[in-house]
Amino acid sequence: MAALRSLIALSSQAALLLLLVALAMQTHLVHSQTCQNQLNSLNVCAPFVVPGAANTSPNAECCNALESVQNDCICNTLRIAGRLPSLCNLSPINCGN
């Protein structure tokens, strides 16, 4: 009988651990999807940042979109983008000043 209670307690702990892992993964997925949606909203800024753009002064729509993006989303995206060349076995990007 004691062995059965131990087995039930152990399986309950394992189920709780699996639930916590699933919750952590879902939270990470939601955060990454939120960041992706925020970055997608920045498409309205494309005309102002492409090389050779005639107008480099962003409009209100671009500024509002940029304001809605969380800082950690932008910083993490830039950090990841900076690592991409090495992950692809390419020379590092050097943008000068």
Image (cartoon, rainbow, N blue to C red):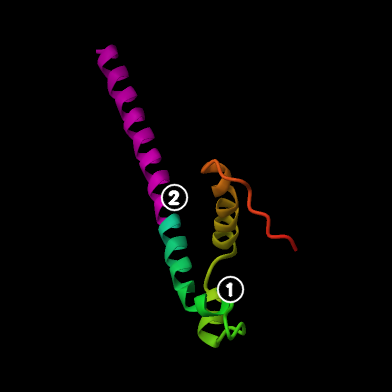
Locate residue 62 relative to residue 23 in the image: left or right. Answer: right
Q: Are marks 2 and 1 in contact (CB under 8 Å)?
A: no
Q: Quadrant of residue 70?
A: bottom right
8 is higher (above) or lower (below) than 29 = above
The residue that mark 1 highlights is: 51
Q: Residue at x 61, y 46 (%)?
A: 91
Q: Quadrant of residue 41?
A: bottom left
Q: Amino acid at mark 2?
A: His
In this picture, which residue range is highlighted in magenta?
1-30
The question of residue 26 being in magenta is answered with yes
Mark 2 → mark 1, Cα distance in angstroms? 34 Å
Q: Earlier in the sequence, mark 2 or mark 1?
A: 2
Q: Residue at x 35, y 35 (%)?
A: 18
Residue sitting at the far right: 97
Image coordinates of residue 16 in percent, x first then y, are 35, 35
Q: Main secondary structure of the magenta part?
A: helix
Image coordinates of residue 81 in percent, x first then y, are 55, 54
**Label drawn at residue 28:** 2
Locate residue 87 relative to residue 95 in the image: left or right. Answer: left
Q: Amino acid at mark 1?
A: Pro
**Label drawn at residue 24:** none
